[in-house]
Image (spheres, rainbow, N blue to C red):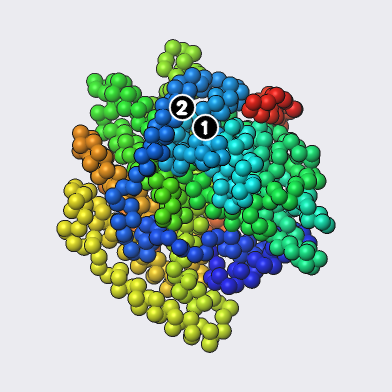
């Protein structure tokens, strides 16, 4: 967060200017924050349900009755899902795990289905299914193999299609979207060896030619998902802005380019390997003197980071969908095993300890699907601003998906820790619970780690406060300016604070149409106001220092995530009860159990806003980093230091370093 937008924008103008990016070591915290602040969407043109939760304005009418996809899209979406299911039943998922790559025939089969163009509009050769049915497809794929889900989501959620649909010209869309829809895999190249979530440190450059007809790209990109097999790349690079270039009309700054993956100067140095997602085609890519025509620039110079962040508003929804699919599969396995496995004279699921784990999986899976479906339809309707909803969905689903997988391993016991291949080799059912745990772990890091997501959401959650009181809490502002700011902030809080005293949650008849779920919606409304009061108290207590209270802000965000998930679960249960009365009771029971579980987590988070060990933890960490407690590390060996014989044997190239490029419908070539 930044205390004021004005100071952020003035700083980012300096960060974007100059003949080259500043050395990584010279990028300061203020400059990094300013670049991120300038890239975020600053205005709220549409209503947002989740934003209201953080302001104590619980407006259920924004999501209830539950929105639905239109009839035509539903017809086409359900037909595609039927075809996808038939195809996925033919995929040898064990081979993907065993050989650490998705077979070419799977690529081709997905292309034949149109799976690479699920979100691409029909007029550009895609299926035009929208976010809701794209999510539904990823739910199904997530239950089969997360690597296939990563392939498709990296291509459509953050690869070439989404930025083009967002900011591309008509000519660019007609040039590249049909190729993407037909199976030309795309990748997104932003991360660098020294640049993760801090875009101010971006070192890749795009130097414009003298006549403005092209740019020359140089840089190294790390963790390029799909980059090993891609035909098309979205590359983020910094356009310098010297006085001469500025006079020639160059804005400078981080810019997005569409680049052909086989362009001279592009080298995929290796295919990376990970603890999970063994089919992931993720590599280390360098660009040296890569010439890119000016017409390949997406948007304008300097808009690259904003395009990337806006793309992620909907793009992040792919991860919750994959998590929901994993949750549904985990529920199936947990139910079957807990019913069949007998210990001490009865099925293990009837023992209370295991029953609690099964109940958590069932209730949380219901809420996961509720969050995925709701955000998907909201994205398709495009009548709400879902930047917070999408970020909350990614944050909450990735955490809960991981917990579900961990509980499944625990329920399965030793069989949960054993690989599917080992189980099958000794005649048992090949249940890959441990693989699921490994595959889902990356979701807490992908497309914004949990820690970064909390900071991004917190920035949006306190946006109204910074708008009202930003100048008031700016430590660099003079007294006279602060007096004027105080008058403005006073007017905002005089209107806002009284609304937090009482609301619909205090009335026993509110939300009566939800029957037994009404009490939980009343709790959400009351807690939303309580959360807003706590946020205001934090602003008053720490003022500009609030941005450094990451423990406090993280808990504020997590409370909002729980309230959002409860709301989605209740609205979904109500819709199911109306559509399928036979399932109404069980849907409400799932939603009610989830709401009760969520309430316990929420109350703990609210308590820990003010009663925690944050200060103690931070002091201890500073001593650890200073080496004061290095003595605690005595008595171990560190194989990664290379001081023993255990690292002298090279890792086989076919397992770790093989680069295999595939082009759907074209000649398949390999390069080591």
- The disc label shown at residue 115, or none: 1
Residue 49 visible, this angle: yes
- Label 1 element class: helix
**Looking at this rendering, what residue extends furthest in the left direction?**
509
* Tag 2–tag 1 contact (CB < 8 Å): yes
Query: What residue is at 44 percent from the left and 12 percent from the top?
Result: 427
Vertical placement of residue 201 versus 155, above or below:
below
Density class for disc 1 (Cα within 10 Å; few <14, some 14-19, many ≥20) is many
Q: Is 370 left or right of 27, judged from the image as shown?
A: left
Vertical placement of residue 397 versus 412, above or below:
below
Residue 537 is situated, as x and y percent measured from the top left of the image, at 39, 70
Residue 141 is situated, as x and y percent measured from the top left of the image, at 47, 31
**Looking at this rendering, what residue extends furthest in the top direction?**
427
- Label 2 element class: helix
Query: What residue is at 68 percent from the left and 26 percent from the top?
Result: 666
Q: Which quadrant of the structure image shows residue 255? A: bottom right
Nearest the viewer among 668 and 356 is 668
Q: Which residue is mark 2?
A: 84
Query: What residue is at 25 percent from the left and 28 percent from the top?
Result: 350
Q: Which quadrant of the structure image shows residue 353? A: top left
């Amino acid at each position: 967060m930044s205390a004021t937008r004005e100071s952020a924008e003035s700083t980012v103008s300096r960060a974007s200017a100059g003949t080259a990016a500043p050395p990584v070591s010279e990028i300061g915290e203020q400059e990094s924050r300013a670049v991120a602040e300038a890239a975020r969407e600053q205005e709220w043109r549409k209503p947002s349900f989740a934003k209201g939760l953080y302001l104590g304005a619980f407006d259920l009418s924004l999501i209830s009755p539950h929105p639905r996809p239109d009839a035509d899209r539903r017809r086409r979406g359900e037909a595609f899902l039927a075809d996808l299911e038939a195809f996925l039943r033919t995929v040898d998922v064990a081979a993907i795990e065993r050989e650490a790559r998705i077979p070419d025939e799977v690529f081709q089969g997905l292309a034949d289905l149109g799976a690479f163009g699920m979100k691409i509009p029909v007029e550009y050769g895609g299926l035009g299914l929208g976010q809701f049915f794209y999510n539904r497809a990823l739910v199904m794929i997530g239950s089969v193999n997360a690597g296939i889900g990563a392939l498709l989501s990296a291509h459509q959620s953050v690869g070439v299609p989404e930025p083009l649909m967002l900011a591309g010209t008509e000519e660019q869309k007609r040039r590249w979207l049909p190729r993407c829809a037909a199976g030309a895999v795309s990748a997104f190249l932003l991360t660098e060896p020294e640049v993760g979530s801090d875009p101010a440190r971006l070192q890749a450059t795009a130097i414009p030619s003298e006549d403005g007809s092209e740019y020359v790209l140089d840089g190294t990109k790390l963790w390029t998902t799909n980059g090993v097999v891609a035909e098309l790349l979205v590359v983020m690079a910094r356009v310098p802005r010297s006085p001469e270039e500025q006079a020639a009309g160059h804005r400078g700054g981080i810019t997005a380019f569409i680049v052909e993956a086989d362009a001279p100067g592009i080298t995929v140095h290796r295919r990376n390997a990970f603890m999970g997602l063994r089919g992931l085609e993720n590599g280390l890519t360098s660009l040296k003197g890569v010439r890119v025509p000016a017409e390949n620039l997406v948007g304008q110079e300097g808009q690259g980071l904003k395009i990337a962040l806006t793309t992620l508003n909907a793009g992040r929804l792919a991860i919750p969908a994959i998590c929901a699919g994993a949750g549904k599969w985990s529920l199936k396995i947990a139910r079957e095993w807990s019913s069949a496995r007998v210990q001490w004279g009865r099925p293990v699921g009837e023992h209370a300890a295991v029953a609690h784990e099964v109940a958590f999986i069932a209730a949380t899976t219901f809420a996961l699907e509720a969050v995925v479906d709701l955000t998907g339809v909201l994205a398709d309707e495009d009548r709400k601003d879902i930047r917070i909803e999408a970020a909350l969905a990614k944050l909450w689903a990735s955490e809960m998906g991981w917990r579900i997988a961990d509980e499944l391993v625990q329920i399965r016991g030793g069989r949960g820790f054993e690989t599917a291949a080992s189980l099958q080799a000794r005649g048992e059912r090949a249940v890959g619970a441990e693989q699921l745990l490994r595959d889902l772990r990356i979701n807490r890091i992908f497309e914004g780690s949990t820690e970064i997501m909390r900071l991004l959401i917190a920035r949006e959650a306190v946006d109204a406060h910074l708008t009202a009181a930003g100048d008031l809490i700016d430590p660099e502002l003079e007294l006279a300016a602060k007096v004027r700011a105080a008058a403005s902030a006073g007017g905002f809080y005089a209107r806002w604070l009284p609304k937090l005293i009482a609301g619909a949650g205090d009335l026993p008849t509110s939300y009566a149409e939800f029957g037994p779920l009404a009490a939980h919606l009343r709790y959400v409304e009351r807690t939303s106001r309580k959360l807003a009061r706590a946020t205001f108290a934090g602003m008053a207590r720490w003022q500009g220092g609030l941005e450094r209270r990451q423990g406090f802000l993280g808990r504020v965000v997590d409370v909002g995530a729980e309230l959002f998930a409860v709301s989605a679960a209740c609205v979904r249960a109500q819709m199911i009860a109306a559509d399928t009365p036979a399932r109404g009771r069980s849907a409400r029971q799932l939603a009610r159990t989830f709401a009760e579980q969520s309430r316990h987590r929420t109350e703990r988070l609210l308590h820990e806003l003010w009663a925690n060990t944050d200060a103690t933890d931070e002091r201890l960490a500073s001593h650890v980093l200073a080496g004061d407690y290095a003595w605690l590390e005595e008595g171990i060996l560190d194989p990664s230091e290379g001081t023993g014989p255990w690292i002298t044997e090279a890792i086989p190239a076919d397992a770790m370093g093989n680069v295999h490029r595939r082009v759907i419908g074209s000649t398949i070539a390999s390069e080591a």
